[in-house]
C-alpha cells in the first residue's frame, strides 16, 4: 500500500462509544451471518467496564445470546456469569404480541362495560391492521426496556430488513396516530359507536376513553422517536464482512439510517484475514517460498492469498466510502469460535485496541 496520512481520520475502534457517557441506546445491525451477536456481546463487555449497569437485548427471532455466553438467557434480564453489572435478555416480538392481545381479552372480560369495549376494540385493531402487531409489540418492548434501570442498552438486532422496519415503527406509528387524532373531529362519535358495538356503554364516553388510550401510546412513541433521533442518546453500529454483498448492504443500511435521522458513525468489519498484513507483502513471501512448500501447502496458501486479495479490495472500498467520517474497525478472523465469557472478554479488546494497520 502507498504511504498515506491517517492522522485526521477517525480512530479505527469503538472507543468513541465507550467514551460517550450520554449514550443510552446502542443498536448493532447488519446482514445475516456477519457477527452481529459477537460484536454486541463484546461491546457490552467493554461498556460494563465503565458503566454501572449494562443490558444486552436480542430482538432477533433466532436468538444467539445464550449460545454466545454459554448460559441460559430468557425473557427477563439474566445476569451474565463473571459480571456483576452485565445482563442480557432475549425478546420475541410475536410472543409479546400474543401476550398483549391475551391481556386485552382478559381486561375486556373482567372490566367495567366501558373498559371492556375499549379493550375489545383495541384487540380487534391489533389483529386486523397489517403491520400494527409488530409496531405495537415494539412499543411494548420500548416501554419494558425504559422501565428497567440500566445506564446503557445494547440491541443485538435481526438482519438488516427486519431491523430497518423495527427502527421505522416510531415514525410510522406517530404518523398513523396523528392522522387518527385529526380524524376524530371529522367523524364525530364514530369511534365511540364502534367501541360501543364491542360491548361498551355511552358512545361519547367511549370515544374519549379510546382517544385517551391512543394518546398515551402516541406519547410513548414520540418519546422513543425523539430519543432515537438524538445522537447524544442513540447510535447504530453497522457490522459487515469484507465481501461484496455485505458491503453493499451496509451502504443501504447507512442511507436508510440517515433517512430516519438515526446517528451512525461506526462500522465493524469482521472475519478479516491478517488485518495487520498487506496482500502484496504476503504475496511476495509466497512467491519467494512457494517452491519449497509441498503441493498441498501451495494450494492452501494460494486459496488463502486469493481470499486475502479479495478482502483487501473490499476493505479498501469500505475506507474509501466511509473512512473520512466513520470509525472503521477491523476484527481478525480467529482459529476458534468466540464463545463463553473468557473468549468474549479477550476478543472484545480488539474493539477498543485494534490491530495496527501497516501503511506501507
Image (cartoon, rainbow, N blue to C red):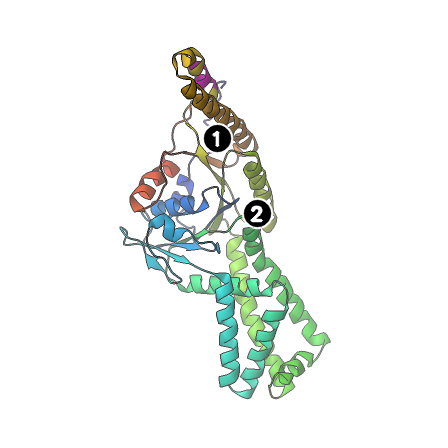
- Label 2, secondary structure: give it: helix
Q: Is residue 101 visible?
A: yes
Q: Label 1, on which residue?
A: 9
Q: Nearer the viewer, residue 183 or 112?
A: 112
Residue 332 drawn at (x, y percent): 40, 33
Label 1: state its secondary structure. loop
Pinpoint residue 127: horizontal percent, then vertical percent.
59, 70
Disc on res. 125? none
Q: Are marks 1 and 2 in contact (CB under 8 Å)?
A: no
**C-alpha gap between disc 1 and disc 2:** 22 Å
Q: Could you say which quadrant of the image residue 58 lies in?
A: bottom left
- Give the main secondary structure, helix, strand or loop, of the magenta stretch: helix
Q: From the viewer's perspective, is residue 220 above or below residue 294?
A: below
**Classed neighbour count for the residue bearing mark 1: other residues with Cα under 10 Å, few (<14), some (14–19), many (≥20):** few
Say if the magenta span includes residue 136: no
Query: Which residues are the magenta region?
Result: 280-285
What residue did someone put label 2 on?
Answer: 257
Can residue 359 be seen by looking at this rendering? Answer: no
Residue at the front extreme of this rendering:
295
Determine whether, in the image, residue 310 is placed left or right of residue 70. Answer: right
**Residue in the foreground of this view, choosing between 95 and 27:** 95
In which quarter of the view is residue 119 placed? bottom right
Mark 1 or mark 2, earlier in chain: 1
Q: Residue at x 39, y 52 (%)?
A: 65
Amino acid at each position: 500500500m502507498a504511504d498515506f496520512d491517517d492522522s485526521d481520520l477517525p480512530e479505527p475502534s469503538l472507543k468513541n462509544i465507550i467514551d460517550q457517557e450520554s449514550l443510552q441506546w446502542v443498536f448493532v445491525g447488519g446482514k445475516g451471518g456477519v457477527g452481529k451477536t459477537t460484536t454486541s456481546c463484546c461491546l457490552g463487555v467493554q461498556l460494563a467496564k465503565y458503566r454501572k449497569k449494562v443490558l444486552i437485548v436480542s430482538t432477533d427471532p433466532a436468538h444467539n445470546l445464550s449460545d454466545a455466553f454459554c448460559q441460559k438467557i430468557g425473557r427477563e434480564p439474566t445476569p451474565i456469569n463473571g459480571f456483576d453489572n452485565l445482563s442480557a435478555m432475549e425478546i420475541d416480538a410475536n410472543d409479546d404480541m400474543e401476550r398483549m392481545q391475551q391481556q386485552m381479552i382478559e381486561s375486556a372480560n373482567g372490566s367495567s362495560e366501558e373498559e371492556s369495549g375499549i379493550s375489545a376494540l383495541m384487540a380487534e385493531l391489533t389483529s386486523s391492521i397489517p403491520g400494527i402487531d409488530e409496531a405495537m409489540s415494539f412499543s411494548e418492548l420500548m416501554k419494558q426496556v425504559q422501565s428497567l434501570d440500566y445506564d446503557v442498552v445494547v440491541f443485538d438486532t435481526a438482519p438488516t430488513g427486519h431491523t430497518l422496519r423495527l427502527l421505522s415503527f416510531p415514525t410510522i406509528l406517530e404518523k398513523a396516530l396523528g392522522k387518527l387524532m385529526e380524524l376524530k373531529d371529522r367523524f364525530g362519535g364514530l369511534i365511540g359507536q364502534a367501541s360501543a358495538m364491542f360491548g361498551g356503554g355511552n358512545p361519547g364516553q367511549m370515544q374519549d376513553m379510546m382517544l385517551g388510550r391512543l394518546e398515551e401510546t402516541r406519547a410513548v412513541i414520540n418519546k422513543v422517536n425523539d430519543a432515537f433521533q438524538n445522537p447524544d442518546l442513540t447510535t447504530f453500529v453497522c457490522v459487515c464482512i469484507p465481501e461484496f454483498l455485505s458491503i453493499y448492504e451496509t451502504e443501504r443500511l447507512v442511507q436508510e439510517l440517515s433517512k430516519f435521522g438515526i446517528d451512525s458513525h461506526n462500522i465493524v468489519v469482521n472475519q478479516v484475514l491478517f488485518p495487520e498484513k498487506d496482500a502484496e507483502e504476503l504475496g511476495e513471501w509466497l512467491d519467494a517460498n512457494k517452491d519449497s512448500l509441498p503441493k498441498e501447502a501451495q494450494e492452501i496458501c494460494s486459496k488463502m492469498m486469493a481470499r486475502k486479495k479479495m478482502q483487501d479490495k473490499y476493505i479498501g472500498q469500505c475506507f474509501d466510502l466511509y473512512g473520512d467520517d466513520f470509525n472503521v474497525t477491523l476484527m481478525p478472523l480467529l482459529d476458534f469460535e468466540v464463545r463463553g465469557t473468557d473468549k468474549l472478554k479477550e476478543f472484545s479488546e480488539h474493539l477498543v485496541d485494534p490491530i495496527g494497520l501497516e501503511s506501507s
